[in-house]
Amino acid sequence: MDAWLTHVDWTEIGYAGLDTLLMLGGALLFSVLLGLPLGVLLFLTSRGQVLEHRVAYGLLSFAVNVLRSLPFIILLIVMIPLTLRLVGTSLGVAGAIPPLVAGTAPFLARLVETAVRGVDRGVVEASQAMGATTTQIVLRVLLPEARAGILAGITVTAVALVSYTAMAGVVGAGGLGDLAMRFGYQRFQTDVMVVTVLMLLALVQLIQMLGDALVARASHR
């Protein structure tokens, strides 16, 4: 095994894996903080809902669709000036998080909107009949009832983020993707490429298993 893995520096692999986890964790946190309320707001301002507003929904929907439609590699490049203003660098873990969030928060918002839209309308109407405010409806009805769907959406987003962190390596963000690009591809070190791909696959499987367990637990409540 050691003879085949001649180019693999496990210390460097470890640091790259840590960078990937930092990018994933930071971007997922901010994506949830932005995407969850955005998804709920999309639902509330849509037709027939408590805050129905055609202009607001149209603008929000347009912005979400634009960000979702841009290929992530293009978004990485386009956001470099904004990333420099926000975090002072476009390189490394810090430089990768703003475009990662911009690419995944709108994606999560649509998933949250879909999950919330699946809540039984009768439950919402009953809450309104009892005098519940919009905030109470969101916090005590919509989010609890849509918990399983929201967790599933976060899981899908986290899996997508893994692939995005790999692409971010192309512009010097670090992580396993950067390692695979610099050594596995540019220097034709197949063993490095195989190891990084296997680590990314293992990470995706772990995220999916954890997400499925949380969804199953939420569904049985």
Image (cartoon, grey):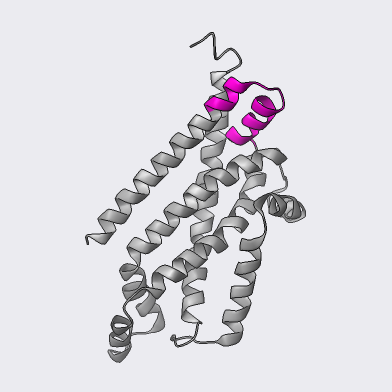
Let me know if residue 176 is in the magenta part.
Answer: yes
Rendering quarter of residue 90: top right
Where 20 sits versus 88, above or below? above
Q: Which residues are magenta?
A: 174-195
Let me know if residue 57 is in the magenta part.
Answer: no
Query: Furthest residue to the top?
Result: 3
Rendering quarter of residue 187: top right
Residue 103 image position (x, y, % from top left): 61, 56
- Residue at position x 55%, y 26% from top? 194
Query: Furthest residue to the right?
Result: 81
Residue 197 image position (x, y, % from top left): 53, 32
Residue nearest the viewer, comparing 181 with 150: 181
- Residue at position x 29%, y 84% from top? 122
**Which quadrant of the figure contains the C terminus?**
bottom left
Left or right: 156 as drawn, with respect to 99: left
Where 9 sits versus 129, above or below? above
Residue nearest the viewer, comparing 21 with 198: 198
